Amino acid sequence: MVGNSKELGPEVNADKTKYMVMSRDQNAGRSHSIKTDNNSFERLDDFKYLERTLQNKNSIQEEIKSRLKSRNACYHSVQNLLSSSLLSKNLNVKIYRTIILPVLYGCETWSLTLREERRLRVCENRVLRRIFGPRRDEVTGEWRKLHDEELNYLYYSPSIFRVIKSRRKRWAGHVRRMDERRGTYRALVGKPEGKRPLGRPRHRWNDNIKMALQEVGCGGMDWIELAQDRDRCRALVHVVMNHRVP
């Protein structure tokens, strides 16, 4: 992957041109270098592209870490508003969804692990506790933080996971309806050669789509075939968005 460069030629500035190799074998390409007209390209272990952090290990951890850092910056800039008694709870929720939640930009391509899901859940609950405030315990009379179940009851908007899953499903339908010559479509339906390594396999992006369908009772459907029907796909995205897990 090459970035921040003009067309390759004698005028290439080597200081502004870098590349990255994504492979399970971390030694892949170490013995080789990319050169043009005596200019060498620097090899990176991670790469920033359209606000997305790509790693040579194809890992999501650093990407989530970067997004949470941006989320914290947004949160601290409006935390006084979120706890203000002058604003209604509904307005504070709108502030959260308008200013803080957009850090999910590009989440359509995420394949999250349980660890990363937990980190996102903790961050959202922190904001919601700021909005809805503490509650007085009926037994002890002391103020305490709201439990997760209480937050789910008070927060009627789709949770952060419902947002991610619905956007992922909508993007899957959009890509499936692309022209078959498009690179994005070919990456979706393509089957790489070779065998997966021994051990527990990584959770794939397709697996997330299938799990989201199972949660809403559509596990037996072929989502690739379903995505060709724009109206049915749009209705399914709405169901995934508003499905509340008890």
Image: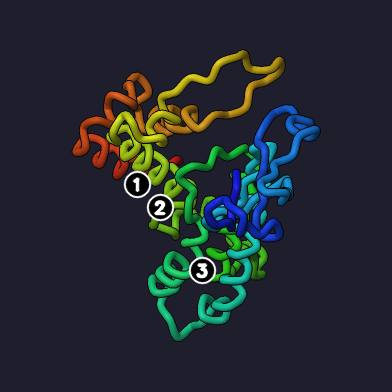
Image coordinates of residue 179 in percent, x first then y, are 28, 33
What residue appears at the point 45 percent right and 54 percent down from the top-left corner?
A: 153
Q: Secondary structure at mark 2?
A: loop
Q: State if disc 3 and disc 1 touch (CB < 8 Å).
A: no
Identify the residue position indicated by label 3 in the image: 132
Q: CA distance from mark 2 to mark 1?
A: 6 Å
Identify the residue position indicated by label 1 in the image: 242
Image coordinates of residue 227 in percent, x first then y, are 28, 31
Label of residue 10 in the image: none
| Residue density around tag 3, few if under 14, some if 14–19, many if 20 or more, within 10 Å | many
The type of residue carrying mark 1 is Asn
Image coordinates of residue 246 in percent, x first then y, are 45, 41
Q: State if disc 2 and disc 3 touch (CB < 8 Å).
A: no
Name the N-terminal-most of marks 1 and 3.
3
Name the N-terminal-most of marks 3 and 2.
3
Residue 175 vs residue 95, the one in the foreground: 175
Q: Secondary structure at mark 3?
A: helix
Residue 211 vs residue 73, the one in the foreground: 73
Image coordinates of residue 144 in percent, x first then y, are 64, 65
Identify the residue position indicated by label 2 in the image: 158
Q: Which of the two marks, 1 or 3, is nearer to us in this view? A: 1
- Is residue 137 visible in the rendered structure shown here? no
Vertically, is 129 above or below 202?
Answer: below
What residue appears at the point 80 percent right and 33 percent down from the top-left corner?
A: 31
The type of residue carrying mark 2 is Pro
Q: Secondary structure at mark 1?
A: helix
Instruction: Kindly indicate the quadrant of the structure image that contains residue 133.
Output: bottom right
